Amino acid sequence: MYNVGKKQRAYAYDLPNTENKEPGKRGAHRWRMQEAVGGGPVLLKDGKPFITSKEEDRAGGLEAMHPRTAIGYTKSGKLIILVVEGRNKGIAEGANFPQMAKIFADLGCVEALNLDGGGSSCLWVNNMNTIKTSDKEGQRPVPAVLVIKQKQ
């Protein structure tokens, strides 16, 4: 997804832009989103591992073990949010991208996307943190969060 022009219009590609195409040309289309969450790499596409870390030029490699936060959905539309604790030696070492893809595939997801990792990975449910943060100082400020609330 790219914002281009004076009005910063959003253009998107259906696959990673490996040919460095200019947005709005050859394969890109206007994206008229209402809300969006960004992340990467892609973990699953059409129910199969499809890790795009190389195409997305992500540092750290496929096998690096870290805390992870990712999201996916099943064919029936069930949303799966997964947070993996890490850097807690002997208890929770984290996960790598192939492991994350396998977990989502095993859960029946058809699409999955890594959101973030490291010290910013956490999942609060009913005002309780579900994992031990990997930062020794505890929770740290982050620029954005995903909040899901039950309708009242």
Image: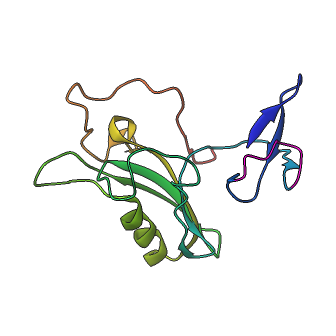
Q: Position of residue 32 (x, y in %)?
A: 86, 44
Q: Position of residue 137 (x, y in %)?
A: 22, 24
Residue drawn at (71%, 51%) of the image: 17
Query: In the image, 92: left or right of 121?
Result: left
Question: Which stretch appears magenta?
Answer: 19-26
Which residue is nearer to you in this view: 149 or 34? Answer: 34
Residue drawn at (27%, 38%) of the image: 133
Query: In the image, 107: left or right of 86?
Result: right
Q: Quadrant of residue 55?
A: bottom right
Q: Is residue 100 above or below residue 87?
A: below
Quadrant (top left/top right/bottom left/bottom right) for the N terminus: top right
Q: How many marks?
A: 0
Query: In the image, 65: left or right of 109?
Result: left
Main SS of residues in magenta: loop
Can residue 9 be seen in the rendering of this structure? Answer: yes
Quadrant (top left/top right/bottom left/bottom right) for the C terminus: top right
Can residue 125 be seen in the rendering of this structure? Answer: no
Residue drawn at (67%, 53%) of the image: 18
Q: Is residue 24 magenta?
A: yes
